[in-house]
Image: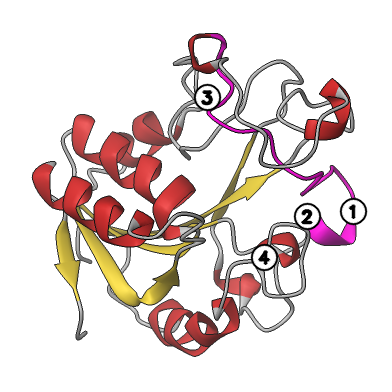
Amino acid sequence: MSAKALLCVDLQNDFYEDGALGVPEASEINPHINRLLQRDDYRIIVASQDWHPSDHLSFAVNHEEEPFTPYEGEDEGLGPVLWPVHCEQGSRGAEFHEDIDTDRFDVIVRKGQLAEVDSYSAFQDNNGRDLGLAGLLKGLKIKSIDIVGLALDVCVLYTARDAREHGFEVNLIRPATRGVNASPGDVENALAGMKEKGVEIIRDY
């Protein structure tokens, strides 16, 4: 079997169109992801899942601020903005989208579980605390990772960059990801940043 993994980032209800932190056109990626999930050339399929406690400090309400308020806390493992309440542990918003063939997931990596630090990447918290994914993949002799999911310009971006930092070959499957694009150009900048790190952008698969 190929030394390749599929990594599905945050395919959770709160990141779909009607969710608390909805990504435009998010549901359009589902058929592409399910097609990839049915392939037999992945040694392992991993899904990441935001899993925040209600007192998570990335939530604007916990600072008595409005969502998307800028926050100068990146050195603390937060920021650069405060988010709406999303993906609370045990909530429907934290569940994987019902249209995703989740029985194909081999491993789920839950991130953002500590109240005081956020976790954009599936590999580590924003303060650098290792989440164990790199060790798992290296233990399985994985060389290459296909990455899909939400959102392209936040958690997918950080996950892809960290995957490259750990020495993996990384392919972003472009039809199977969408971005928030909160500011014009965010998606294009994220794609350019990934390319600079050596991520291959796959538009046809």
| Residue position for label 1 | 91
Q: Amino acid at mark 4?
A: Gly
Q: At 36% from the left edge and 48% from the top edge, which residue is drawn?
A: 157
Q: CA distance from mark 3 to mark 1?
A: 21 Å
**Is 116 on the left-hand or right-hand side of 146?**
right
- Which quadrant of the figure contains the N terminus? bottom left
Q: Amino acid at mark 3?
A: Asp
Q: At 38% from the left edge and 40% from the top edge, which residue is drawn?
A: 158
Q: Earlier in the sequence, mark 3 or mark 1?
A: 1
Is residue 124 highlighted in magenta?
no
| Residue 94 image label | 2
Q: CA distance from mark 4 to mark 2?
A: 12 Å
Asked if disc 4 and disc 3 are in contact, CB closer than 8 Å, the reply is no
Q: Amino acid at mark 2?
A: Ala
Q: At 40% from the left edge and 76% from the top edge, which residue is drawn?
A: 176
Which stretch did the figure color magenta? 76-93
